Amino acid sequence: MTIKEEQSKKAMEEFYDFIFPENVREIETSKEFLEKIKQLEEALKILSEKTSEFTNVNKEEILAVIDDNNLEKIILFFRVLTAVSRMNMETYFVSDLCASGVFEPKIKEKDGKAVEREIKFGEKTTNMPKYDNLISMAKEHNVILKAMIDFFEKYELISKLQSLNGKKIEDIVELSKTLLKYSEKGAGAEKSGEEAEKIIKNKLKIWGLSENIDYNKNDEKLTDILKRKIEFLKNKSKLKDNEVQNSLKILKSQKKSRQFDLVFPAEGSKKEPKVIAQIVFYTSNTGSEGKKKTNQNIDTTNYIKKILPKHFKEIMNLLVLDGPGWIQMVGEFQKNEYLSENFIQIRTVDTKLKKILNEQEFVYPIDVEIAIMELLLKETNASKKKVLEIIAKKVHIKTDQKSIIEQNPQFFDGKTDEDEIKIDQSRHEIAKKFLILEKLQEIKPSKKSQEFTMLIPTSTNLEISDLDIFLELSRLGISKDEIVKILKELEKEGTIIIQ
């Protein structure tokens, strides 16, 4: 493996190691899931045998391989390989058939009013076909089957099949297990997105963030966010009157309807917005939807540049996503600087997102608690002065002591430099866990492992050995048993990967 390939591999690891809700995890043991894995394996064996282990792959050969008995299995495999969900088939593929004239779109009327869409195919007019209907139609009509293969080729089916040459069937099946969960979740994408948002917001609450102050409860419109940003820049004398008027004029003429799931801080804080993010999860980000969401976020960044040409870097636009939904975007992540720097994976909320917010001058209760815990473990009095000194010295926290105090009055108000700063007893274990997580990110790999290695997903995965971990953390006064216990908790939460 070349150095470049190794770098690409490390940069992409984060997308394959991810946390997902329990109800998604249960899919793996379901009878339906196991049956589909069996179908994938059968399809792979058929395709490999009929195409000389994928060396003789073209559209004609694929059509020659498919028959009524194997069509459903092979199409399932093509969907998984190209990251096309059932929902994509029911929308984009049907749209392609309408555009090409294979289907004739119709509007069904009742009592003179339009009630739903229909399609006319041959002599029949039916409701918009669902996935199972499309499979049945492909068995009966070669024109549908040919169009289906053309559709997959838009997602580089042929080249992806060719890339399987030399790979073991069992290895391909193993990768397909991960992708299958996402390919099958189309109908539940919106609900899954809500689950993802809930996971993230629960993490923010653990940091001590307040809803509608530190971050928003409901989605905020991009237009409103930018109006608020302009007002703050104006009050700080960073924008001249003519620049303000020009920015507001562009906003009014080119209103964007996009809404953001996370805004730091929220409108209710009456503070300047500095970080915005959208959460994209499961099959809402597979296939063409993945590229659509990516392009939307890049367009948003370009739009912000147009509104605030001199200050666009003062509002960070992030994408929060899971991994496998972006499986086909590997090439895009490797060549696109925007994508590599402006995404947060769900697994990296406690690492990368927290660091980004600290770099944007936000200091939260968890940051204060981490500093207090570090002093307590060293059996040192956690005075106001010492706590502030520890926080201010941290490279990733970009603010001064005055701002730290203003953002966390519950700890510092009415305290002299020598007064002790305390945290609630119920928060001790949480503070200790985040202290360890922070220290893990600072460790420089030096020793070979004896028992295990650990990956910490940040911008790429940081791999460190057990010897490095125990050596560094024991200096804090934490026993080996306690370190292991906390590492297992972090792994269970999906924050680190122990291997």
Image (cartoon, grey):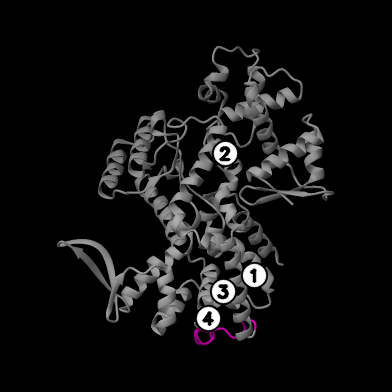
**C-beta proximity under 8 Å, tags 1 and 3:** no
The kind of residue tagged 1 is: Ile
Whether residue 416 is visible to the viewer of this picture, yes or no, is: yes
Query: Does 140 sit left or right of 389 as displayed?
Result: left
Residue at 36% across / 71% down in the picture? 94
- Give the image location of residue 259, x and y in percent: 37, 46
Q: CA distance from mark 1 to mark 3?
A: 12 Å
Q: Earlier in the sequence, mark 2 or mark 3?
A: 3
- Give the image location of residue 326, x and y in percent: 53, 59
Q: CA distance from mark 2 to mark 3?
A: 37 Å
Residue at 70% across / 63% down in the picture? 3
Residue at 39% across / 41% down in the picture? 219
Q: CA distance from mark 1 to mark 2?
A: 36 Å
Q: What residue is disc 2 on?
A: 354
Q: What residue is disc 3 on?
A: 160
Q: What residue is disc 4 on?
A: 69
**C-beta proximity under 8 Å, tags 4 and 3:** no
Mark 1 vs mark 3, foreground winner is 1
The kind of residue tagged 4 is: Asn
- Give the image location of residue 346, x and y in percent: 56, 47
Q: Which mark is drawn over residue 172?
A: 1
Between 29 and 4, the one nearer to me in the picture: 29
Mark 4 vs mark 3, foreground winner is 4
The region drawn magenta spans 53-67
Q: Earlier in the sequence, mark 1 or mark 4?
A: 4
Q: Earlier in the sequence, mark 4 or mark 3?
A: 4
Mark 1 vs mark 4, foreground winner is 4
Residue 47 occupies quadrant: bottom right
